[in-house]
Amino acid sequence: MTEATASKPNAGGLHDWGRWFGRPGRSLTRRLIWLASAWIVVALVISALVLTQAFQESALRRLGAMLNETIDEIVVGASRTPQGEAIPQIQDARTLRLLSGKYWQIMEVRPDGRLVSLARSTSLWRYDLALPADLPARLDAAFGDVITFNTTGPKDDAETREPLRVAASMKSIPRHEHPVIFIAALDRSDVDADTRQFARVTWIAFLILGLGLVSAVFIQVRIGLRPLFDLRDEIADVRKGRSARIGRSYPQEIQPLAEQVNRLLDHNQEVVDRQRTHVGNLAHALKTPISVMLAEAGTSEGDLPELVRRQTKIMQGQVDHHLRRARAAARAAHGLGETTPVAEVLDELAVMIEQVFRDKNVEIDWRAPDSLSFLGERQDLQEILGNLIENAAKFSRRRVRVSAGGSGLGQMILVVEDDGAGLPADQRDTVMQRGARLDESAPGSGLGLSIVDDLTRAYGGRLMLADSDMGGLKAVLELPAAQVD
């Protein structure tokens, strides 16, 4: 139990990390480019720092070797005479020129820890080298060895003091009571300048290299993922009804996915075909008995035949309603469908419904772009718009207005309005129910808006009712639109 509990933080962290990289909505292209770019940047930055540090250390080692030679010279040349310390004769003109940048100094460590200068190079003039306070202790711990460190040059003005690289060693010399420290120093301004120049050139070169690598990664990812983009576009064409299957050949890593999509499309087609067959069989099985009942009841008089006729018509309307709904659901579930020009359907319906309501002189004013198409079957769009326009004409005074247009989101908006008395807001939900009729004097079964709502939902759309600026009711319909190139 304890082990399982202890392992949860790591597992959760890995899970969260993986979930972040696989979060829906994130671009796979951007993810690959960012990951590769981040690795390139980190690798180049570390490489630049390492190379700059290595260059500086190499230069300082060369400087240290020169300092060691100077210390060896002053150790060999140092001696004690009755008059004091003899100044070593070093064959280097820089040590004879004042404040030249190359210095040496011999110092004695007194028992109380003080450092006393015994001799210095001419280049130091009247100054002593600036030494760290813990230098005697460090040299004593490494007696006989050379240690190096950085300090500043011997000038009164701190701003003009040159940076120095210093080497020091503590040794014992004959006829000398206390340990002696031999110190050599060199101006490291050139080394620092070379290091900065090397760093500048390295960073510029690595920046150019990084930009080139990131560009190469971008091109590689775009080219490498091109088959995925092509597959996405081909699936979109299938979804929009432009093609029935995925027909291209893809790389071996993606081809199985394309084949599985084709198998899924074939399976959906089989399901839709079986559904349509069952719906057709059910229509024939139910309509024939209902027709017989209506025929038999139509030849008789009385309350019972009248009741049979009325209830049989209701049954017939309900059967037609559910059969239409089942057919629409099967077609919509198929996902491919055909594309239907909206303008053609509106033109046909306007002519037909104006003829039906010619006694009222109903005028149907419709507007729709020629390029606008419904992503579905023609008979379903005729059913939807026919019910809406007929309902509007039925309750209008004279005018019905229909407008259609794309919404830019793969959908289209159709608006049907009339100049009738309208419908109160509290009754709009009621008229959407199957068989509901607010005006019993008007002809119809009360299934029109219910059929429209069911068919619209089957296609993933929606129907809304509102007040029209013409004075009557406004029906706003949202349906899938076929994109036209």
Image (cartoon, helix red, strand yellow):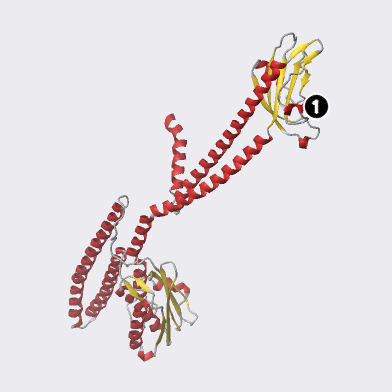
Please state if 317 lies on the left or on the right of 479 as rendered: left
Looking at the image, residue 191 lies above or below residue 444: above
| x then y, percent, for residue 2 | 44, 29
The residue wearing badge 1 is 125
Three-letter amino acid code of the residue under disc 1:
Trp
Let me know if residue 149 appears in the view: yes
| x then y, percent, for residue 485 | 38, 70
Please state if 318 lies on the left or on the right of 16 as rendered: left
| x then y, percent, for residue 194 | 63, 38
- Which residue is depicted at the point 69% across and 35% down? 189
Query: For mark 1, does the 10 Å Cα neighbourhood hold few (<14), some (14 to 19), or many (20 or more) residues?
Result: some
Quadrant of the image for the N terminus? Answer: top left
Q: Nearer the viewer, residue 321 or 75?
A: 75
Q: Nearer the viewer, residue 53 or 217?
A: 53
Q: Secondary structure at mark 1?
A: loop
Q: Quadrant of residue 174?
A: top right
Let me know if residue 138 appears in the view: no
Looking at the image, residue 222 lies above or below residue 7: below
| x then y, percent, for residue 130 | 75, 27
Give the number of marks: 1
Q: Quadrant of residue 106?
A: top right
